[in-house]
Amino acid sequence: MCSRFEISSSAREIMQALSLKAPPPLPNKPEVRPTDAALMILDDAGERRSELRPWGLRVDWSTQPMINARAETLNEKPTFRPLLENRCVLPASAYFEWRKTETAEKRKNRIYGDDLLVMAGLYDAERVTIVTCPPAPAIQHIHNRMPVLLDQNGIQAWLSNAPSRDVAPVLAPFTGVLMFDEETPPPPAQQDLFG
């Protein structure tokens, strides 16, 4: 998954979609980038609550934050294995991927659904990361990874206190509706005919 997503939904829409009792704090800008504050929802003793945390885990072996965690290797990686019971979801209106064209030009694609997208995440004491998986068929021509997007049953399972091995089946390509808009390149600069 690329390193940006959008949260343009209202606090009320997020409350309703994720069964929150209080309005969530929203990031201070609609496009979220690595290290920006991202809205995460977690289950706290049977009640969902929300908070903002920086997107991207700090790791000793890299200066770059770990913004993504591959679903297929969560149990193998020492960075993520201790966090498997620290599960959360991150709401998004859309996420962005860049696709290379035949001319090697990169085009930004905004990927979205019929409703709010809800991404699976993991968190540590300070930060949050997004879990990724292979892409859904509708967008596999854009990128070879995507965030794990959860439906209502998936949200319920991921936020439950069930062992991670029992909820691992929700970490699969999205089967719901996904759409995309590709950014059109700017027109070429016109030459001054009078020189």
Image (cartoon, rainbow, N blue to C red):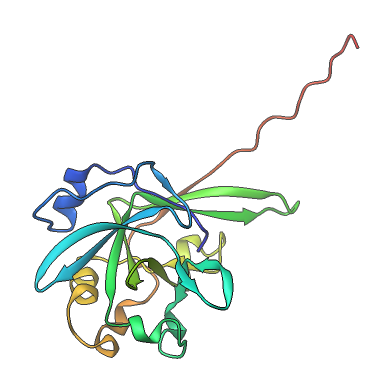
Among the 4 quarters of the image, the one containing residue 69: bottom left
Which residue is at a point 31% across and 60% down the rendered structure image?
Answer: 90
Task: Note whether residue 144 is visible.
Answer: yes
Which residue is at a point 57% across and 78% down the rendered structure image?
Answer: 61
Task: Note whether residue 136 is visible.
Answer: no
Which residue is at a point 23% across and 88% down the rendered structure image?
Answer: 163
Name the residue furthest right.
195
Q: Position of residue 189 (x, y in %)?
A: 76, 25
Q: Position of residue 96 (x, y in %)?
A: 49, 52
Q: Position of residue 33 (x, y in %)?
A: 47, 52
Q: Looking at the picture, tell me which residue is in the foreground, 87 or 149.
A: 87
Name the residue furthest top.
194
Answer left or right for 115 relative to 189: left
Q: Looking at the picture, tell me which residue is in the foreground, 118 or 103.
A: 118
Q: Position of residue 79 (x, y in %)?
A: 45, 82
Q: How many marks?
A: 0
